[in-house]
Amino acid sequence: MRKKPQLASLQLAIMRTLWQKGEATVADVRETLESEGRELAYTTVATMLAKMERKGQVAHRAEGKAFIYRPVLGQEQVSRSMVTDLAERLFSGDVTLMVSHLLDGCEISAAELTRLKALIRKKELEERNAR
């Protein structure tokens, strides 16, 4: 079975940068992280990108002396995996409890509630059609 992608905070910040830019050098990633309040050494970012590449999360191509990194994992793939892991670890797989905590802990607009209801109706239809 293939391991589901799980990213630590810094890895996720790096992936967000790559998802947003499509591809980036170590300096580009470092600059973006710095603008978000993460002051890291160039070597720290380079080391993290190399580790992420060994794990199959990013890939690079050389352009002159610079390595240009791109994401291998898709944002949707990582999001789904991490949310599923959160539901399992924190709520023992109880999705209703997890959603209840989200609804109680976040400000939700009427438009967001309407969208959530539509998503629930869509899921209900998918379940009915799967039977």
Image (cartoon, grey):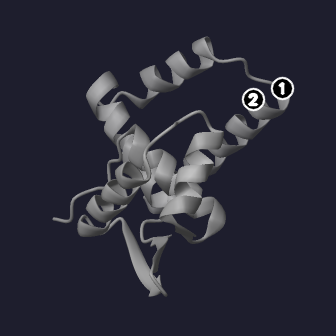
**Image: 103 above or below 11:** above
- 103 left or right of 55? right
Classed neighbour count for the residue bearing mark 2: other residues with Cα under 10 Å, few (<14), some (14–19), many (≥20) = few
Determine the residue positioned at 32% across, 24% down. 90
Figure quadrant of the N terminus:
bottom left
Kind of element beneath mark 2: helix
Query: Which residue is at the front of the view, 65 or 57?
Result: 65
Query: Looking at the rendering, in which quadrant would you find the C terminus?
Result: bottom left
Q: CA distance from mark 1 to mark 2?
A: 5 Å
Assess whether mark 2 and mark 1 are in contact (beta carbons under 8 angstroms). yes
Q: Which mark is residue 113?
A: 2
The x, y position of residue 98, in whole percent, is: 45, 24
Q: Secondary structure at mark 1?
A: helix
Residue 112 as seen in the image, left or right of residue 32: right
Residue receiving disc 1: 110
Q: Position of residue 74 (x, y in %)?
A: 49, 65
Rendered location of residue 75, percent (x, y): 52, 58
Amino acid type, mark 2: Leu
- Name the image quarter holding residue 111: top right
Q: Residue furthest top?
A: 104
Q: Residue at x 64, y 50 (%)?
A: 122
Query: Is 85 or 37 nearer to us in this picture?
Result: 37
The 10 Å Cα crowd at callout 1, few under 14, some 14 to 19, many 20 or more, is few
Say if 53 sits above or below 5 in the image: below
Q: Amino acid at mark 1?
A: Ala
